Image (cartoon, rainbow, N blue to C red):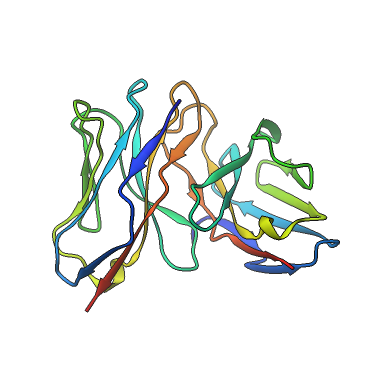
Amino acid sequence: ETGVTQTPRHLVMGMTNKKSLKCEQHLGHNAMYWYKQSAKKPLELMFVYSLEERVENNSVPSRFSPECPNSSHLFLHLHTLQPEDSALYLCASSPSVVGANYGYTFGSGTRLTVV
Amino acid sequence: GDSVTQMEGPVTLSEEAFLTINCTYTATGYPSLFWYVQYPGEGLQLLLKATKADDKGSNKGFEATYRKETTSFHLEKGSVQVSDSAVYFCAREGAGSYQLTFGKGTKLSVIP
């Protein structure tokens, strides 16, 4: 039990579909993150939320839309994706966005395949 | 900007061999440093960390020492096991920010 749960674990979607990824943490953390992990590329930070407010959006295309309704839940809404968006999407949480010296707790990820 | 450079993989070792995975970081400020491990099909797990110069992080037989003079945080283990096969990521706390900056990862395969 990592404390950060992501669903679904695997997702196959067509380019015209709309789907959502879900992340849930019960660690009492105030910050949550979305990362994209593609083969042979570094981890890419996509979005950062602190107490349900978005504090960072790293030039992510608008076909990815995050939502953080409360400090325990984070969603990533997907629509009209491209095949190059196929990747492992990782959610993480941390006690605070102020100082990263506690490290992050990661979920197991959602393996997304766009066909 | 902040960056982390770790040795290219993959690394293949026999069981009980000595492991070193090199990691260097840009010397901006005095960041906390981390090693994360990702087992097949899983997310990243924190393996160890060090928060100041000369600190040694250790866990599960792995060690890494924060070397300010060489801006390095190399991961070592004296005797690897098949179960250590995974991808290892070095990371640093962002200078003046909350973010973690990750290296590209090093895949380790341990064969019996």
Q: Quadrant of the C terminus of chain A?
A: bottom right
Q: Residue at x 47, y 21 (%)?
A: B96
Q: Is residue A86 visible?
A: yes
Please indicate whether residue B61 sits to the left or right of residue B1 in the image.
Answer: left
Q: Is residue A50 visible?
A: no
Q: Residue at x 42, y 37 (%)?
A: A102
Say which quarter of the image contains residue B88.
Answer: bottom left
Please indicate whether residue B30 sits to the left or right of residue B61 in the image.
Answer: right
Question: Viewer-proximal residue, B100 or A87?
Answer: A87
Q: Position of residue B106 (x, y in %)?
A: 35, 55
Q: Position of residue A9 (x, y in %)?
A: 62, 67
Q: Residue at x 24, y 35 (%)?
A: B72
- Placement of B91 over or under A78, stated as above or below: above
Question: Viewer-proximal residue, A10 or A94?
Answer: A10
Q: Position of residue A8 (x, y in %)?
A: 67, 66
Say which quarter of the image contains residue A89.
Answer: bottom right
